[in-house]
Amino acid sequence: MAALDSDSEEDLVSYGTGLEPLEEGERPKKPIPLQDQTVRDEKGRYKRFHGAFSGGFSAGYFNTVGSKQGWTPSSFVSSRQNRADKSVLGPEDFMDEEDLSEFGIAPKAIVTTDDFASKTKDRIREKARQLAAATAPIPGATLLDDLITPAKLSIGFELLRKMGWKEGQGIGPRVKRRPRRQKPDPGVKIYGCALPPGGSEGSEDEDDDYVPENVTFAPKDITPVDFTPKDNMHGLAYKGLDPHQALFGTSGEHFNLFSGGLDGAGNLLGDIGVNKGRKLGISGQAFGVGALEEEDDDIYATETLSKYDTILKDEEPGDGLYGWTAPRQYKSQKESEKDLRYVGKILDGFSLASKPLSSKKTYPPPELPRDYRPVHYFRPVVAATSENTHLVQVLSESAGRPRPDPGTHSRHQLNASKRAELLGETPIPGSSTSVLEFLSQKDKERIKEMKQATDLKAAQLKARSLAQKASSSRLQPSSPDTGPGSWHVALSGGTAATRASSFKPFVKDPEKQKRYEAFLVNMKRGQKDALERCLDPSMTEWERGRERDEFARAAVLYVSSHSTLASRFTHAKEEDDSDQVEVPRDQENDINDKQSAVKMKMFGKLTRDTFEWHPDKLLCKRFNVPDPYPDSTLVGLPRVKRDKYSVFNFLTLPETASSPTAQVASEKVPQPRGPDKSRKPSRWDTSKQEKKEDSISEFLSLARSKVGPPKQEAGPLVIREEEHETESPSDKNVSKGVDSQTEGEGSRPSMDLFKAIFASSSDEKSSSSEDEQGDSEDDQAGTGEADFRSSQEPDVVETSSVAASEPAAPEPAPSFPIQKMQMDEREAFGPRLPPVFCPNVRQQLEAPQKEKHKKNKEKHKTKKEHRRKKEKKKKHRKHKHKGKQKNKKLEKSSSSESVGSSGSSSAEEGTGGLSPQELLRRLKSLPLRRQ
Amino acid sequence: MAFPEPKPRGPELPQKRVKTLDCGQGAVRAVRFNVDGNYCLTCGSDKTLKLWNPLRGTLLRTYSGHGYEVLDAAGSFDNSSLCSGGGDKAVVLWDVASGQVVRKFRGHAGKVNTVQFNEEATVILSGSIDSSIRCWDCRSRRPEPVQTLDEARDGVSSVKVSDHEILAGSVDGRVRRYDLRMGQLFSDYVGSPITCTCFSRDGQCTLVSSLDSTLRLLDKDTGEMLGEYTGHKNQEYKLDCCLSERDTHVVSCSEDGKVYFWDLVEGALALALPVGRGVVQSLSYHPLEPCLLTAVGGSVHCWREEAYEAEGGTG
């Protein structure tokens, strides 16, 4: 820092430049803030040291190349007088001057590149580096670099230098003659220090210039020309991996310095025959290690220092040449040169090669046949496959050409398979059709099967159509070949004809189409003049020719599309009709077997069904479980399409699906139920009923809300419902005996209901009486309620018949609505919820609603029918009278044990169905309620 | 075994009534322990769901929001949420602490008989009398179920979930086990309408109770029957069954007001515990201790082993 007051203290030494003194009144300049202290180039451009092409990182405004706008768009101006000259822009036109400067990408100044830099420079540089290394903070830090980077100055050079070689000299023993005397003989090449035979020796002698005796000259430095013939397809100078090296390993050996160091001459020195089995180091790159190679040490030509000799040693492995090399293989390159002697001194360890180089064998070009025409022309190609050999024959013969003998096919008429046949190759499976090759064996089999099936069908069709065609054809009728022996013919050639008959290329011209069909028929039968015969004799020659072409083309077209395409496509097995619906592929069936198995307590295989089931992907994710079918888009059970309107799809139980009576039921034919008949109509059967009941129930509920619950009718109604429940055929439950019977009291949707709606009242009576019988049979099991119920039955019958007779009546009888409602209130299927003994009246009101479940096992079958009803009606019911639901409870209480009935008491109920115990209990519960 | 285990104590059956909860929510349709057994849920027919401490008898919270009676409930593994299903066909996801309805899944066509969380409480599985099991995603806001398992031919009365399986009992008399990992559905025919199914705690067996008053222990992998337990009465109602905390006993409700205990291996009736006068409609066994909750009518009883002594004061 400069001292401003240096004048006062003169003995002080001041460094640097002093700041200019502030003028009076001038405020000191603000220091440049840090963010403004930016680096700029000499033109003041921001952060710019390189051209845009050399790494200048921000081009654009102010940094743009050339102008503010970037590359100046050169305006194209061209006039008649002043033609614009076409300027070819090079990359330099888009560079800015930094790119063209010394350090840019395209320096204008002449710079010595590395390739041309003298090697002697290296020495100086090395010196400098050594110095630097010695003075560096870490001594010897650059030592490693020196060792690692031998490329600049290879050890070979060093060795040569140490042996006295100098740059510019050739390699070889020093010669006595003057270097300029070495005139290369045009006939004989001189390589390195090898002297031309004969004359040159003499010429030297003839030279009369003074040559000091003891002065020798270094041979001329000649870059030997590589005459190794290029017999491969590799790029120039490509050197692949030596398989011997890779396979047998030379990890212990040293690189041959000179094959490695003298890069371009590598081929020259190291060659196959001459190096006495000595393996050369690997040079060249490979892309990977083969699977068979056990050692992969040297494959990637890694250079390590251990592979180099860093000192001169006495014992050199191998030839003992001490690194001295001479071109070797050229000495014995030709047979004629075998007797050539190396003129100079033969070095120790060298010997003239006795074995000549094996010359590359060359083959003469193939002799062209005499009739070879080097011009390719297209002709209508009819591939002679098995399917259209007839066509080929017929075509060729009709055209008046001699039919080629199958043995002497001209090679243009052969296809690959024929040629293979001629050559005796085993046919490649599937080689005839390219796509088929890529099919798996399984698919092929499948296609084959389908093809066979369709062909079979086609053969039958063909027989039929042939007969028809024969009668309609104006040509002589041909009897369809139906013999077993001709079946194959029908398959091969015949299918084409039959299919072609459905393929009508000339529909617009019926005459022509007819001719075409006749042509096909004839052709199929192998008639040689098929074409001629079927052509209209009245046609002109030109028309004939054209039609001949057309027919042939159509036949080929058809056959090819038939054979190649038809084998890969199949007709849709099922129409995409809306009549189809998807149903699960696997059904749980064999209920009967399972029932017997259950009866015998043989659980296990007999009772188990296993299905493929596809969980949703998201579900798997949520369960932290890998998707078992990651490729499948299916969810759930695999499904198949079935007829939509088949009853069987919608029967809720599999066993009903198998019973023929299900259909009867679905037709809503009211029939008295036999013991064996399945009385489970399918889900759809009830739809009409549901609708009716729905509307009715709505109406009824309205009416009911006004009238209020008629309590006296409740009892019979309940029992009526009970009756429905009891009419269960128990055809399924085998094993239960008494239990099953008591369970059998569950509610079933009773045919009576259907009859009540759809049948006349006379039918109704008989059927309901049957029901009663069945009911009483059920009750024989000895349940205490049986008596009670049977006493009510007459009433039941009456009410039901009344109800049945008035289904469509707009003004419902009071009993009818209630009955309907009761039906509706059976909401739950499956095990019902237990009743509650609860002191709270309100809760009781709610609870009984839910207690109405069918007890019967059988009720499941009918459940689905009711479900819809229920769901619709439940809504109405919920808001309405709860008093009615108590009626139901009564029924329950009577049918079930006392526990169940205990909870069902309510003061408002009619007393008809109440047992004394219930009354007592109710009395007890009354005070509780008040609390 | 590397070293002999201490001789296990003889299993003690809960037969001492330690608490009675008067739930005051109508009929208790189901009582369920939470995951660690410290709390219990009662599903009432008065549309409420209540959370209790059964040992102290304290009511912790009432969850109301169902439109009809609540038929089943379950707690999540972290006790942070509850799910319940009921007669209003809805499956409700509750927040335990706030008591609010988090989500209401609608889609069932009938009453929801049973609900379960999966292990991580990311999916609620609900079985309904519409014969379908629906898998509701708790993570997304999708209103539709992730998947609907509609293989059942009749109402689904019971659904249980393990880490990769869904076990469902249906009124069509079949027990279906959906194995997500294998992508298979195993359907075992039992014949009688199934009221309750559950896995054994070792995951090897399934216990199936059906309306023929029989409980069956089935081998999970083969479907073979390992044991049969009879003596109770279950012919009409949907009653619960379970296994004791160490799989030593089979426990089932009965319609005669008792709870029956059978020895699992021998199949012999070990205990018929009189609970009340009505039908024992639901029970739940403590996951770790011999503690049983039974629901009869409108009240819930808590049972412990004889040697049990209540700790602390009673609430």
Image (cartoon, coloured by chain):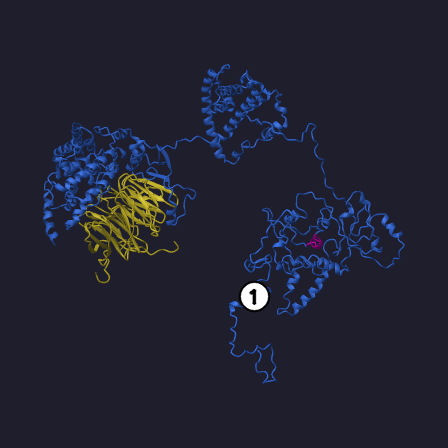
Chain colours: A blue, B yellow
Q: In the displayed structure, would residue B194 be above or below residue A478? A: below
**Left or right, residue A14 beside residue B11:** right
**Left or right, residue B29 beside residue A242:** left
Quadrant of the image containing the N terminus of chain A: bottom right
On the image, the x and y values in percent for residue A245 come to 65, 49
Taking the magenta stretch, the answer to whether it contains residue A547 is no
Residue A817 visible in the picture: yes
**Which residue matches tag 1?**
A39
Specify the amino acid type for callout 1: Val
| Of residues A355 and A708, the one drawn nearer to the viewer in this rendering | A708
Tell me if mark 1 has few (under 14), some (14-19) or many (20+) residues whose alpha carbon lies within 10 angstroms of its own.
few
Classify residue A56 by image quadrant. Answer: bottom right
* Stretch in magenta: A255-263
Label 1: element kind = loop
**Left or right, residue B273 beside residue A284:** left
Q: Residue furthest top?
A: A476
